[in-house]
Amino acid sequence: DAGVIQSPRHEVTEMGQEVTLRCKPISGHDYLFWYRQTMMRGLELLIYFNNNVPIDDSGMPEDRFSAKMPNASFSTLKIQPSEPRDSAVYFCASSLGGPSTFGSGTRLTVV
Amino acid sequence: LAKTTQPISMDSYEGQEVNITCSHNNIATNDYITWYQQFPSQGPRFIIQGYKTKVTNEVASLFIPADRKSSTLSLPRVSLSDTAVYYCLVGYLSGGYNKLIFGAGTRLAVHP
C-alpha cells in the first residue's frame, strides 16, 4: 500500500484565496483525521470522519475551514478565505480504529 | 481528559539506551498509551501501544507500572537516525479521537 497520500506537498497562496488540501487514506481504513501542526500550537486535531461521516469537528478553528469526505478514498480540507495565520503543515491520517498512519503533510504558506 | 507530561528535550549518544518517561496522572480505566515518532518534514509515525505491564516490538519497549500513572518508552542502542520528536498519547480509541491529544513531545537528539 502506498500509505496515506496528500496533495499538494507545498502550497503558497495569497491571503483571501481559497485553498483545497486533498487526502487519499489507506484503502480499507474507516477513520480519517485532519491535523494541523504549527510551532506555537503543536499538533491539533481539526476533524475526523468515520465511514465518511464527520464525527467531531470541534477542532476546526472557524467557519472558514470545511472538510468533506465524499467517498471512502478521498477527503478534502478547504480554507476560504485563507489568512496568513493559517500557515502551517496540515496532516491527514487514517486508521482502522487503532493507531493512525499519517501522510507526509501539506505545507501551506499564506502570504 | 488525560493530560500527559514529558520532558521537552533529551540528549543521548549512539549506542546508548534511551528512556523517555511520560506522566499521565488522570489516565482512565479504558485508556491506552500510545507513542509516536516524528522526523522533520514528516508525519508522526506509530511506534508502540500498551495498556499495562510491558510491551515490546522490533523498535522499542513500553513499560507501564501497575498504577498506570506513567509510562516509559525505551529505545535500545539508539543511532543518529533516532533523532526525532517523540509523543506520548493517552486515550481510548472507541471513545472519540478528540481524546487523543498530542502534547509538545520530547525532542531527542542523538550525538555521534
Image: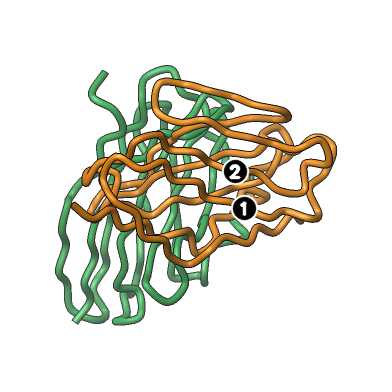
Chain colours: A green, B orange
Image-based side of B55 in relation to B27, left or right: left
Counting other residues with Cα less than 10 Å from the Cα at mark 2, is it few (<14), some (14-19), or many (20 or more)? Answer: some
**Which residue is located at x 43 percent, y 38 percent?**
B75
Task: Name the mark on residue B71.
Answer: none
Q: Residue at x 57, y 60 (%)?
A: B6
Residue B72 is tagged as: 2
Percent x, y of residue A24: 31, 33
Label 2 resides on the chain identified as: B
**B112, above or below B50, in the image:** below
Residue A8 to residue A75: above or below:
below
Identify the amino acid type marked 1.
Cys
Question: Please, is residue A74 above or below residue B9 in the view?
Answer: above
At mark 1, the secondary structure is strand
- Amino acid at the residue labelled 2: Thr
- Which corner quadrant of the image does residue A89 belong to? bottom left
In the displayed structure, B21 sits above or below A111; it is above
Q: Earlier in the sequence, mark 1 or mark 2?
A: 1
Q: Which of the 4 quarters of the picture holds residue B34?
A: top right
Q: Nearer the viewer, residue B93 or A109?
A: B93
Chain letter for mark 1, please: B
Which residue is found at the position 23% from the left and 55% from the top? B111
Left-right relation of B52 to A108? right
Q: Residue A30: x and y, percent?
A: 51, 25
Cα separation, mark 1 vs mark 2, equals 6 Å
Of residues B26 and A10, the one drawn nearer to the viewer in this rendering: B26
Q: Which residue is mark 1?
A: B22
Residue A14 in the image: x percent, y percent?
A: 18, 78
How many badges with numbers are in the image?
A: 2
Could you tell me if the residues under marks 1 and 2 are in contact, i.e. CB atoms within 8 Å? yes
